[in-house]
Amino acid sequence: MRLFGLMALGLLAACASAEAPVAVADQAAVRSLGEILEQSPAADWHTVDQNNLLYMQLPQGRVIIELAADYTPLHTANIQALARAHYWDGAAIVRSQENYVVQWGRDEGDPRPTGAGTPTLAAEFDRPRGGVQITRLPDPDSYAREVGFANGFPVASNGRETWMAHCHGMVGAGRGDTADSGSGAELYVVIGHAPRHLDRNIATVGRVLQGMELLSTMPRGTGALGFYETPAERTTITSVRLGSELPASERVNLEALRTDSATFRDVIDSRRFRRESWFLDPVGHINLCNVPLPVRVRS
Amino acid sequence: MRLFGLMALGLLAACASAEAPVAVADQAAVRSLGEILEQSPAADWHTVDQNNLLYMQLPQGRVIIELAADYTPLHTANIQALARAHYWDGAAIVRSQENYVVQWGRDEGDPRPTGAGTPTLAAEFDRPRGGVQITRLPDPDSYAREVGFANGFPVASNGRETWMAHCHGMVGAGRGDTADSGSGAELYVVIGHAPRHLDRNIATVGRVLQGMELLSTMPRGTGALGFYETPAERTTITSVRLGSELPASERVNLEALRTDSATFRDVIDSRRFRRESWFLDPVGHINLCNVPLPVRVRS
């Protein structure tokens, strides 16, 4: 009595593989997400700068993170400096909290050369709204007056400032009690429902483009707030490198769909209005963090 | 240079353990989530009916699910009948899709006595709003005119009907293409950002009270939509039992905070306004699926 109906519900997190089948009668009118992406012009994609890509090698596989240089330029520069100093080689995943974050870094008693990196940075929790082009969503948001996408990232705004939103897969920089106490040396990734109360309280610095499933399935820590209680529970990070420092043969040429493109507007429309035959209610709404941000490997 | 600041961000998913520390000067005024729960009167909690609890034993540990008898009575009764028939003993986790769902059931070619259970059921995607007491949230929602909590579950409404919302940890019943093609024999749990587009398209039947971390960390399937490609990748379910069928010594006496209680209103307030010293922006908003639904083991 296995029901395959739920197969029709697939939401593609960050890839361009085929969407669920639609009823034959509808196919002429309804383009699947996969068809929208396949039929997109090349100009609607942009090649991600290898200098903004962190390749984090874990025993289980590789995670690739894109840094958001225009929203958090100071953190991006510091993280790049720390990566060039091989700061995270031998660091560890120290925390895995259910429906919240997975976090990595170094213990205080484990100093490591930081190269040109600095231990604290000015806060980059938001930036002026003026001059930032945002592809807006029409539906209300629980936390912000305006939400949408800027240069490939989910963002929110109050009309004066804009900031990146803590959606699933977004990466942020841990900090202490003061606004300037973060540096990007300790990073976390959102693995659950978007903890949007962190928006504007901490610097989000990028998002995971590949390998999210390696981080999200880390066994949960049993200590307070999901910290691992013993060193044996941690996962040691083999290395973190900038794509620009890797030999060309080890780089992944990633293309992200431009969030100011016509194709991306079609993606939003196809996820707001669910025209596939499985959907009995076509919905007609979407939350910021439910919009897929397609990424593909350039062949 | 390890920063512990992020330790202060803990969101308790479904338990009453201690919240992050607050600054000493604030402690008189600011109650942590843990303190709010510790100081709550016994009458603000209710004992969960063992007849509505599914105990799912996996090799990794035990998951406990509460069925929502008042929102989905037909599905609840059918799931209870299937559990009494030991329908899921030897069934398997068949799907694990990143930022979406983990799903379990039986293959079509693997029939199993269903006891008094039936293979299809009338749709239970919503119910009339009239007569349902909802503890409302004041912030806007991307999908519904009204959101809040009814009898321990996150719910939404358009003013005429109300339905349970697909928040993280909610359990639903897979279905085929028609509204009545689900039965509860194939179930899924939300492991990522709330896929609210499933609301009113499928029956949500309950939520996970314990053991969520066992489901959310299942290795992701590499087939389409996260289905496992080989039997070896699946996790076999040892057994699923109703609490009322277990010997008293094997039951867990769970208490859930009443969502119509004064304590729960204090919980909502403490999560909407973040008064802990770490928060530089006190937020003042909350999304339906970011509100913790506290559960404790009765000692």
Image: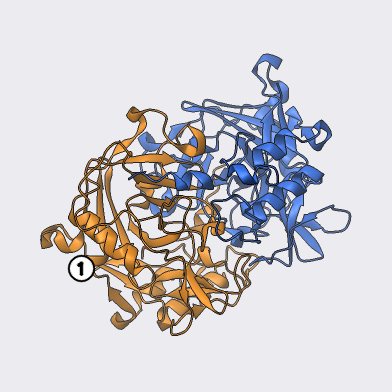
Chain colours: A orange, B blue
**Horizontal relation, residue A133 to residue B291: left or right:** left
Above or below, B60 relative to B168: above
Using the image as rendered, state which of residue A93 and residue B227 is in the foreground: A93
| Host chain of mark 1 | A
Q: Quadrant of the N terminus of chain B?
A: top left
Where in the figure is residue B257, as x and y percent of width and height?
Answer: 74, 38
**Horizontal relation, residue A269 to residue B143: left or right:** left
**Horizontal relation, residue A76 to residue B15: left or right:** left
Residue at figure coordinates x 48%, y 41% from the top left: A97
Where in the figure is residue A285, as x and y percent of width and height?
Answer: 61, 70
Using the image as rendered, state which of residue A48 and residue A42 is in the foreground: A48
Where in the figure is residue B159, as x and y percent of width and height?
Answer: 81, 66
In the figure, residue A233 lies in which quadrant?
top left
Q: How many marks?
A: 1
Q: Quadrant of the C terminus of chain B?
A: top right
Above or below, B160 relative to B26: below
Using the image as rendered, state which of residue A129 and residue B86 is in the foreground: A129
Where in the figure is residue B144, as x and y percent of width and height?
Answer: 70, 66
Write down the residue under mark 1: A299
Query: The residue tagged with tag 1: helix, strand or loop?
Result: loop
Using the image as rendered, state which of residue B192 and residue A92 is in the foreground: A92
**Horizontal relation, residue A78 to residue A123: left or right:** left
In the figure, residue A110 lies in which quadrant?
top left
